[in-house]
Amino acid sequence: MIEKTRQLLSSTGWDFVKEFTLSRIERLDKIGNCTIIYLGSTGGQRGSKNTLKGRYREFSLRHTIMYPIWVLLYFNWKLEFGWKISVKPKQKEEELKINYRKLHNGKLPALVER
C-alpha cells in the first residue's frame, strides 16, 4: 500500500509534495494488527474553536491526517469514526493515551506518533 503510493507520488515529479505527504503516509506502517486508529482531540478548553465539526472539516480539507486516510480509503479499508464526549477532555485524552500505551508496548497510536 505504501510502496504503491510512493510510486504514484514519485511519478508526479513534485519532490516537495512527495516528501511531505510520504512523511505522514509512512506512519501507516505502524498500524499493524490494531484496528483502532486514534486521530486526536478536538480541544481541551471550554469555548475552544476546535469543535468536533471543525475537526472533521480539517480532516477533509487540510489536516495532515488526511493523506493516510485517503490512502486507506483508496485501498478499500472500511473506516468507522467515533468520538467520546467528556466534561474534562484533556484529562480523558491523557487517560486514553495511557491506556493505549499499556496495550501497545508504550507506543502512541500510529497516526499520532511522530
Image (spheres, rainbow, N blue to C red):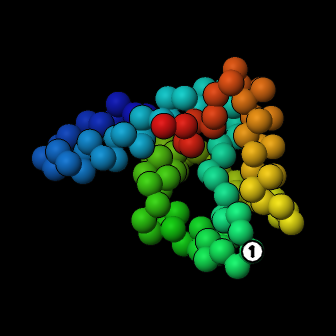
Can the viewer see residue 2?
A: yes
Q: Is residue 17 left or right of residue 37?
A: left
- Residue 65 in the image: x percent, y percent? 49, 52
Residue at 63%, 37% in the rendered image: 109
Of 98 and 62, nearer the camera is 98
- Residue 52 in the image: x percent, y percent? 68, 70
- Residue 98 in the image: x percent, y percent? 77, 36
Q: For residue 90, what is the image quadrant?
A: bottom right
Identify the residue at the far right of this view.
87
Callout 1 crowding tier (Cα within 10 Å): few <14, some 14–19, many ≥20: few
- Residue 50 in the image: x percent, y percent? 61, 71
Of 93 and 2, nearer the camera is 93
Q: Identify the element where label 1 is drawn.
A: loop
Q: For residue 42, what is the image quadrant?
A: bottom right
The N terminus, quarter of image = top left
Residue at 62%, 51% in the rendered image: 39
Residue at 26%, 36% in the rendered image: 7
Identify the residue at the far left of this view.
13
Can the viewer see residue 9?
A: no
Against 43, is 65 above or below? above
Q: For residue 30, what is the image quadrant?
A: top right
Circle 1 residue: 46
Of 108 and 31, nearer the camera is 108
Q: Is residue 25 left or right of residue 34?
A: left
Against 106, is 52 above or below? below
Counting labels gives 1
Q: Is residue 32 left or right of residue 26?
A: right
Q: Give the residue type at disc 1.
A: Arg
